[in-house]
Image: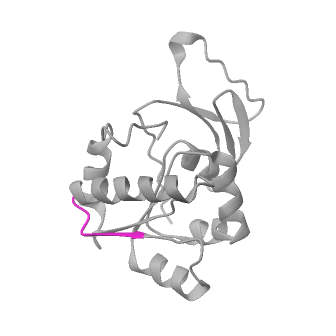
Amino acid sequence: QGGEDVKRRTNETLFKEVRKLSSSGKILVIPWASDSLEKEAEYSRMLCDYFSYCGFEKVLFLAKTDPENEIQRKFSEVDTIYLPGGDTEVLYRELKQRALQDRLLEFSGIIIGNSAGAIVLSKGGWGDGKFYTGFGLVDFYVSVHYKLNVGHIVETKDAINVNIPENMWVAVTNEK
């Protein structure tokens, strides 16, 4: 996703469609896009309500304190993972500290990245006028919150860059 107003549920159509594709009816949220525990808790409550509203029977959250066996259990229980928007550097750092980029790469279900989440899933990307490094789970760069009408120009030499406007998304399939 290029970005979304989660409070207003501006991309609920996407999540309702993803729920139709989910055979388990369970989604795992990795809510680590902020250093503020209060902000993370508030956002987690909103996402729990949002995903329940969209039809998911169970919304699981990965905690920063989860031991390896709990992380493995949660990953194996779901077929959908959500990486939220927020502070891209914090999300990247937290995922890297736990080597979760490898687990995400091996995950065979649906992974949704919103804004910061989209950037860390890609090779890297632009958000708020700044470039951030990603893990390269998809083979292109992204620009989130893209605004064509304000002359938002992103130059990428010898690489693919996908520009994703607010409240829009790009679907990538990897048939194995």
Residue in front for this viewpoint, 1 or 94 = 94
Residue 169 drawn in magenta: no
How many numbered marks does the figure carry? 0
Q: Residue at x 45, y 30 (%)?
A: 166
Residue in front for this viewpoint, 80 or 66 = 66
**Rendered position, 68 above or below 174:** below
User: Which quadrant would residue 27 be assigned to in this image?
Assistant: bottom left
**Rendered position, 160 above or below 50:** above
Q: Is residue 136 visible?
A: no
List x then y, in percent, for residue 128: 63, 29
Q: Residue at x 54, y 79 (%)?
A: 71
**Rendered position, 150 above or below 129:** above
List x then y, in percent, for residue 47: 36, 55
Residue in front for this viewpoint, 74 or 65 = 65
Residue in front for this viewpoint, 61 or 173 = 61
Q: Which region is colored magenta?
A: 55-60
**Colouring mode (rainbow / by chain / secondary structure / one colour):** one colour
Q: Is residue 4 visible?
A: yes
Residue 58 drawn in magenta: yes
**Rendered position, 139 above or below 20:** above
